[in-house]
Amino acid sequence: MDIRAITPSYAVSPQIETGDLAAIKAAGYVTVIDNRPDGEIPPHLHAATMKSAAEALGLTFIINPVIGGMLTTDNVTAQREAIEASAGPVFAYCASGNRSSIVWALAEAGSRPVDELVGLPARFGYQLEHLRPQIEALAKAG
């Protein structure tokens, strides 16, 4: 498992296993967001299995599948609501961490400078520059 802290309160990661959840909790995360659709992964990693394991450890588990190339407004809203409702730091995962970074940047539009929303994920190789116009538009609309 590779925790990539975008901010002190939000981290992303490539796909995790149920055995990683204890380390996520030990690292201080209280909410886990699954941004990976079940159709991409084997059954032992499906959201229901991960949710059960996370909740057994006292973690909040949010299922918000983001389909590659088909990100929706509902995905952005769900991510924002999960982040806002969390009692502490949030850990989100998908295949590589990229989708979790993108949905975070869009969810945070208007609450952080656009340069941060593009630049912070870039430290981990997530290139969001192409989203700058969309982030700016969301910031103005919000």
Image (cartoon, grey):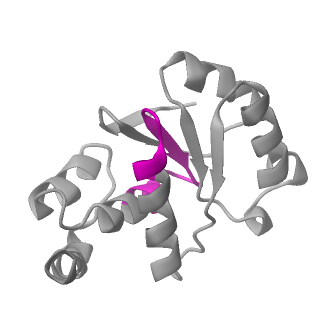
Q: Residue at x 51, y 72 (%)?
A: 75
Asked whether, in this view, residue 138 is left or right of residue 53, the answer is left
Q: Work out whether residue 83 or residue 50 is closer to the camera in this orientation and state it.
A: 83
Picture quadrant where residue 103 is located:
bottom left
Q: Residue at horizontal 43%, vertical 50%?
A: 83
Residue 18: x %, y % from top left: 76, 33
Q: Quadrant of residue 67?
A: bottom right
Residue furthest toward the top? 26
Instruction: Judge whether 5 appears above or below 124 on screen.
Output: above
| Relative to 53, 61 lies left or right | left
Which quadrant of the figure has residue 30? top right
Quarter holding the N terminus is: top right
In the rendered image, is residue 71 in sight? Answer: no
Q: Which residues are magenta?
A: 83-101
The residue depicted at 39 percent of the width and 56 percent of the height is: 101
As for residue 86 lying within the magenta part, the answer is yes
Location of residue 46 in the rendering, given as x and y in whole percent from the top left corner: 81, 53
Q: Is residue 8 magenta?
A: no
Location of the C terminus by quadrant is: bottom left
Residue 114: x %, y % from top left: 13, 63
Q: Would you say residue 54 is visible in this rendering?
A: yes
Q: Position of residue 71 (x, y in %)?
A: 49, 78
Q: What residue lies at 57% left-to-right and 69% top-to-bottom?
A: 66
Q: Is residue 18 above or below residue 104?
A: above
